[in-house]
Image (cartoon, rainbow, N blue to C red):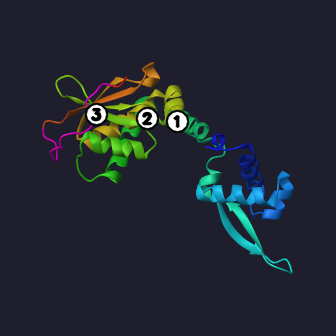
Amino acid sequence: MLEGLGRTQQDLLNALLHHGGGMSIDELAEHLAVTRTAIRQHLAALERDALVLRGDTRPTGRRPEQLYQLTDHAREQFPRHYQLLASVLIDEVAAIIGPEALASLMRSMGRKLASDREQQVVDEARIVQHMNQAGYEAEVFFRSGGTPEIVAHNCVFHRLAAAHPVVCELDLALIGALGGGEVEHSECMVRGGHVCRFRLRPSETPDVPTEPASGNTDQPA
């Protein structure tokens, strides 16, 4: 997200990152070598985007100075190395319990995530809503014959899954548990596909009947 900001706004956020207690307009203007008016304008825009908030005030002997700080949302825009940690953890767990048990663990995690989100079986449209809330860009499409499938245009675990394909088991278990059936993963970006395609094959005796899926009727380009 920071890449979409102007250079001055990026520098302003970086300055606040290095001053956890906050900075005043005068301090920011001096640090960035721009006018106080410009700082006010940038702060207003960054407040609007939930990247900056007003923190404490600091006594000066005259009028107290308002200090500005980064929001938690802004801090998350700076580089993180969650993938490195996750990759190391997967390697260590695989070494301890073995690849088959690791795959079983991933499926168990996927089912747990599903139960945290829904208490009953849902249709493909509802599954897509959950996927998009998690950062996917997914849609429901209907193939010839009216069979619905979920098409994801990105994968939130792509780099991690490329190194550890077992991560895909979590997604498959999540979708399957939400939809009450097995999942056919007919196309996968990790395997060289342009998208990820998931097709539900409902169990013969699902716990709760699924509702008809709704979505686009055209094939993705």
Please tell me whether the stretch drawn in magenta is mainly helix, strand or loop. loop
Residue where numbered disc 2 is placed:
102
Residue depth check, mark 1 versus mark 3: number of the one nearer the observer? 3
Q: Residues within 10 Å of mark 1 (few under 14, many from 20)?
A: some
Q: Determine whether label 1 and label 2 are within 8 Å by CB.
A: yes
User: Can residue 104 be seen here?
Assistant: no
Q: Quadrant of the C terminus?
A: top left
- Disc with the residue nearer the chain's start (1 vs 2): 1
Cα–Cα span, label 2 and label 3: 36 Å
Residue where numbered disc 3 is placed:
216
Q: Quadrant of the N terminus?
A: top right
Q: Is residue 97 left or right of residue 22?
A: left
* Residue pictured at 28% horizontal, 41% vertical: 125
Q: Position of residue 201 (x, y in %)?
A: 21, 31
For label 3, the SS is loop
First to last magenta residue range: 205-219
Q: Is residue 166 left or right of residue 184?
A: right
Q: Residues within 10 Å of mark 3 (few under 14, many from 20)?
A: few
Q: Is residue 118 left or right of residue 50?
A: left
Q: Position of residue 19 (x, y in %)?
A: 78, 59
Tell me the amino acid under the disc marked 1: Ile
